[in-house]
């Protein structure tokens, strides 16, 4: 059996965590299956840290803007069969999809939605046009606002098994006649970490990131300076009052690394009264396993990234979520911690110091609440592949007269 995962993201500890969580699930349900990852990136990329003798990683089949003429010819060939679409990465990707027994769409953000990612959608269309039924593995899905994109997405989604991680996605899909089921983020299915090399003096784990240079909501209406000027004075005051160090955790890797940005955050915190020895950029974080370990060993997490919040919830660590998208708010909803979420656009109107004090003072209550959520969140993170497994069993036992 060959299971091909399309549109796997990487160079981001959150995407790596979700991808590995999904791969572990596949391996548990289909021990002998050949697993193939087809990567999605607009730049050269690495691979997620999941390796065994029956797993291959194809980060050499990226479909880039230069491949779009072949993509158009491929779609046209479904109506006019004699049209050739070459032998480049489009053709090679089609072959891999044809050879697969099952297609899974890797967990990720709103590529079908506000990101309006044509190349991402193209791979899903390829699967559908080749007669496959893609299983969406707990994605964020919604409307893009582009008529043609949304029309093509609707066609592909109608022929897919759709599992999402947000109730907002359920509502939007229902409004266009798409049936979907809701689970939670795939990373909740990862095994619990036992060893931890990062525990030290009490500290606040800070996971910052930039938005102005990539996010559709902030490219025309920058927010980075406002966030820094509002957030960091409050964090510095809070940590000085409570004798806490600060560990700044990188979230992006490879071509996407934010080294200069993280150094800027560190120097600003020092200028606000923190000593140089009490603010650390955790450059030893080399994998999402390390990323989770730093979060797990902290007293409190302040995260501007979605998976920073997910790992705080998973490890029962009090946190403050600074939500740049709805997915962070929803993670707080299903973990019953909505009072720990702040809309990033409303940050300048928020008493951040009071919020931090509230989280710190209610540490035990928050921890106890999160500990009770672990089992159900793990189960909900497994819905798509459990369904795929049941479909597989059903298809392979048809005609059995026992």
Image (cartoon, rainbow, N blue to C red):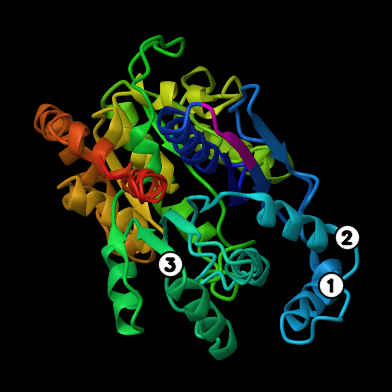
At 50% across and 64% down in the image, what residue appears? 223
Instruction: Report which quarter residue 121 is drawn in.
Output: bottom right
The answer to which of marks 2 and 3 sits earlier in the sequence is 2
Question: Is 281 contained in the magenta span?
Answer: no
The answer to which of marks 3 and 1 sits earlier in the sequence is 1
Magenta stretch bounds: 32-36
At 46% across and 30% down in the image, what residue appears? 24
At 33% across and 65% down in the image, what residue appears? 346
For residue 269, side relative to residue 237 (left or right): right
Whether label 2 touches label 1, CB < 8 Å: yes
The answer to which of marks 2 and 1 sits earlier in the sequence is 1
**Residue position marked by numbered label 3 in the rendering:** 141
Whether residue 132 is visible here, answered yes or no, is yes
**Residue position marked by numbered label 2 in the rendering:** 88
Instruction: Report which quarter residue 94 is drawn in.
Output: bottom right
Whether label 2 touches label 3, CB < 8 Å: no
SS at mark 2 in the image: loop
Other residues around mark 1 within 10 Å, as few (<14) / some (14–19) / many (≥20): some
Quarter placement of the C terminus: top left
Spatial distance from mark 3 to mark 1, Cα to Cα?
Answer: 26 Å
Other residues around mark 3 within 10 Å, as few (<14) / some (14–19) / many (≥20): many
> How would you classify the magenta stretch by its main secondary structure?
strand
**Residue position marked by numbered label 1 in the rendering:** 70
Other residues around mark 2 within 10 Å, as few (<14) / some (14–19) / many (≥20): few
């Amino acid at each position: 059996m060959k299971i091909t995962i399309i549109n796997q993201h990487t160079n981001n500890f959150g995407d790596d965590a979700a991808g590995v969580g999904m791969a572990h699930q596949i391996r548990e349900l289909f021990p002998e299956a050949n697993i193939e990852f087809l990567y999605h990136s607009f730049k050269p990329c690495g691979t997620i840290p999941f390796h065994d003798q029956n797993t291959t990683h194809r980060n050499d089949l990226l479909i880039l803007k230069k491949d779009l003429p072949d993509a158009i010819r491929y779609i046209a060939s479904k109506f006019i069969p004699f049209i050739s679409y070459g032998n480049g990465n489009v053709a090679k990707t089609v072959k891999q999809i044809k050879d697969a027994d099952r297609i899974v769409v890797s967990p990720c953000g709103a590529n079908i939605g506000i990101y309006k990612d044509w190349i991402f959608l193209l791979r899903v269309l390829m699967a559908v046009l080749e007669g496959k039924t893609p299983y969406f593995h707990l994605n964020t899905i919604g409307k893009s606002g582009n008529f043609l994109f949304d029309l093509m997405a609707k066609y592909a989604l109608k022929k897919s098994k759709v599992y999402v991680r947000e109730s907002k996605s359920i509502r939007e899909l229902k409004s266009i006649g798409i049936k979907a089921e809701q689970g939670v983020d795939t990373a909740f299915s990862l095994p619990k970490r036992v060893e931890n090399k990062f525990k030290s003096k009490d500290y606040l784990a800070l996971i910052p990131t930039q938005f102005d240079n990539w996010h559709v909501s902030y490219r025309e209406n920058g927010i980075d300076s406002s966030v820094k000027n509002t957030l960091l004075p409050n964090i510095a005051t809070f940590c000085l009052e409570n004798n806490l160090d600060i560990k700044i955790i990188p979230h992006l890797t490879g071509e996407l690394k934010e080294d200069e940005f993280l150094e800027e955050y560190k120097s600003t915190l020092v200028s606000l009264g923190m000593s140089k020895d009490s603010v650390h950029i955790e450059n030893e974080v080399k994998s999402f396993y390390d990323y989770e370990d730093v979060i797990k060993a902290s007293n409190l997490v302040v995260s501007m990234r979605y998976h920073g919040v997910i790992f705080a919830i998973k490890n029962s660590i009090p946190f403050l979520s600074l939500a740049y998208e709805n997915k962070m708010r929803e993670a707080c909803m299903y973990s019953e911690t909505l009072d720990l979420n702040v809309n990033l656009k409303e940050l300048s109107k928020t008493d951040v110091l009071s919020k931090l004090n509230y989280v710190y003072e209610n540490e035990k209550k928050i921890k106890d609440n999160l500990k009770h959520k672990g089992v159900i969140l793990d189960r909900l993170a497994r819905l798509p592949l459990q369904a795929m497994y049941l479909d597989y069993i059903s298809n392979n036992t048809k005609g059995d007269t026992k």
